[in-house]
Image (tube, grey):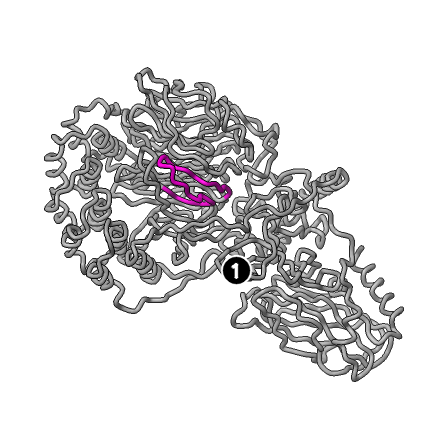
Amino acid sequence: MTRRLIYAATLLATHLCAQEPAVLLEGEQLKVLKHTGQARLQDLRSYRHITWSGMAHLWWTGAKPGDVLELALPVAKDGVYRLGAGFTKAADYGVFEFVLDGQPLAGPIDLFNSSVMHAGTVPLGKSITLKAGEHRLSITVKGANAAAKKSYMLGLDYVVLATGADADVMALAKPLIVTQPSKPAVPVAKPQRDISYNNLEVQPLKAAEQQKKFTVPEGFEVELVASEETGLPKPTMVAFDDAGRMWSATATAYPCDKDNIIWTQPGKDRIVVFDTPTARTPQMARTFAEGMVMPVSLLPHGKGVFVAQGPEIFYLDDRDGDGHADERRVLAKGFGVQDTHTVPHQLTWMPGGRVTFSQGLLNSGRMTDAEGKIFVFNRTLVASMKPDGTDTRILSAGMNNIWAWAHGRTGRVFIHEANDLGYSVVPFEEDSSYPGFVAMKLHPSSPIHPPTAQDLNLGGTGFSGLAICDDKSGSFPAPWHGLLYIANPILGKIHAVAATLDARGVWTFEKRGDLVSCADPMFRPVAITFGPDGCLYITDWYNRIISHNEIPRDHPARDKERGRVWRIRHSSQSSAKVPDMTRVPAGELPAHLKADSTWEMRAAWHQIGQRGGIELIPALTQLAADVNTSVDARIHALWSLEEMGHFDAALWATFLADASPDLRREAVRSLSTLKVGEDTAFDLLQPLADEREWTVRYEVLRFFRRAAGPVNPKHIAWLKRWSANPAPKTEVKGWNGTYLALGGSYERAFQDFLLSLAETKSPAAVLNESKWDKTIATAPEPTAEEVAALSKRIAAIKALLPKAKPDQGRPIVESTCLACHSAGGKGISLAPPLDGSSKRDTDGILTAILAPDAAIEQVFRLYRIETQDGGKFEGFKKNESDKDITLMLMGGATQAVPIAKIKSAGYVAGKSVMLPFAAGFSDAQLADIVRYLQTLQ
């Protein structure tokens, strides 16, 4: 119905009811005469615990103080009236003033409330004499409550015209409120998945043709290492062993979610080895193991390889040395497989002889390690274990997907969050808790880590690789040396980022351009690593479709047979032969710890740890103690001694007195691995009484937490000297919240958290399984009619795109979409960022707009709570504590429901937390929205 017809119908209804004591006019049906931002109907049927008339209101968004919304107010008969109005209150609503035909009515009216509620009928001033006809109601934004989010929104449910100077508008409005929707429900179809980030029409190229499409800086070249033509379809990653060989795995069945059977049967995938990967010509794959099912991470070690595959982490051994796996040892099992792309991954060998790995947000399970210990392993966690699968530790909780683990020469680790939400590069610290789409803490007392890269704005929702160019020579030259590189498969780019550590111990990150881009939209860099030759190796998933849940698993556009590994080489890099460190005599290995090549240095460390031999201890001790040797070489010598189980108190005293905080940190950390007695360590650590480096302090506190024996009050009193002064409380705003700022406030809170654990020798990880995380309902599948209707409307809107105007779509996006999404650092970030939409498929964007249920990740399922008194609450499950469950509503407002009052709570399968918002827009406006979204990089 057009606005003109709506107005005529409203006027007729008013006329028919003119003799009644009051008339209620639905806000969403009033004619809009003037506005800034957007003024449109908002369907409110999902808020089932609150009643609006017609379960909708007129929603004014995108305004600022001083802006005016003007509405036509139809009056059927001359007379004296009192006016009232029904409003919505919420955390992001403003303060407003009301004027009718230039005459002040009421104001200011403050519509702030910490959660969404209906304000009831609010009288608008005293009685007023009105003539029959159209009048002009002006609503001006005067500001916002000090506690409100400054979005200045207005929700006008209705206006009441009550006859008589003394009419009670509040009482007269009650019987007129329509408790059911005033219009037929908008069908929520589910015909297609959201195919954002994808290009279904593009045709695949041969590797040689794709190679011509790359753009790299002057002096660089792109070389093909392997492809489907050399036996490598759908590679997930590559890893180099100590002999310089390159390992990879295929995942031709990907994705395959919620299928527990597939993991119990032999699959079609393989683990392969390339014996001479640094050669300048494409290399043929050699099969090491068959019958695999989508392994997503490998860690070559010894004669075999650690494998992360679905619900298990296992080791494949080549006991007879014939180049093929002949024994499989399960080290950990029971990981959740609800979502293929967030199963355990990022297997990495770390100091102390431990294997780390991470899991993403969408999986939950009960993991059992090789000792038989059971761990609740839900959502995003980083963990580690010994190579035999024992002594499992949970290291951190939070973020959404951590598809990166970059370990620098001096032991610093960087990770990243897949979505561009201010954590696209993060200096990792064990025992940390990070924000995520679903709030979770490693421990109830954990402070939440603040954002680390809010201004980086790389764009995209799937960062999936991080590599450090830190070879001292033989790798990239300046200005590309010393940078971090980030793989972005959404945009098809490799970004370069500079990292700087300031005097406060705070890292800052700055984008330095793109190292790699490609004109072939099927280029999907899903993993990167620097190889033994100092070149950057890129695993190219090569696919039209990079998204996961949004496209049917069996969609024919999914490429199941192609994949490439590319090498980025600078012309200044030589083609020197890579040494096979497995064949280097043991006595020569310590010298290789001083290598300029990071790979060579690491391989020597690995080999020393695997081979052992007390005859190496003197050379390692001499190297580690030599203050004229580089710090990174001394640290690798320390790690080697640590893995050999050798502790020398005099040597460690030298480490702890060194000027390098990295060396001091690693020396303290190793004390736990070496099981040094607490009293011995206490005496040794006395020079650190005035330690200023936070990371060194953290390791000291961890040592006393882990040390065997009872708590020693003397030691705790000594540790408390670092917390004697009042803690600073500087805050910073970040993704969906306010955090203690880096530079002192957060670091002190984290230190005090570790101190509290040391005082009781308590574990940092206290993770419990929630009984409120089950599925309690399932949304119905769409009907054939709904499927056809959606397809028809998509086609109609696409026909308008050639003439669509992105400048007219922008204000609509900023006033509506950013109530849940973010773009360019603006918005709510309840849902994934819109950055990178220029690479998204048109059909996918329209499907997401018209039918949000069609493409939901599990985490964005609607969460429903029913209380014991009959109340119902629906929204996005943001957080759960021992006291309440907090829901986030569209627009960013929150609603906390006490657990003591909950009757039932859980997810609604197949139902998105996002409401369909297209009903209030014409096809032309939706075309403008799509065109604007496709300008976002």
Is 319 located above or below residue 665 in the figure? above
User: Which quadrant would the N terminus be assigned to in this image?
Assistant: bottom right
* Residue 821 coordinates in the image, percent (x, y): 55, 52
Residue 534 in the figure: left or right of residue 313: left
Q: Residue flagged by tag 1: what amino acid is it?
A: Asp
Q: Would residue 211 be seen by someone viewing this image from the given angle?
A: no
* Residue 737 coordinates in the image, percent (x, y): 47, 59
* Residue 206 coordinates in the image, percent (x, y): 50, 22
Is 38 located above or below residue 768 in the figure? below
Q: State which region is magenta.
A: 362-383
Residue 623 in the figure: left or right of residue 406: left
* Residue 393 coordinates in the image, percent (x, y): 35, 44
**Element on which disc 1 rests:** strand
Magenta span main SS: strand
At horizontal 70% and vertical 46% (from top left) the residue drawn is 188
Reading the image, the residue beneath label 1 is 884
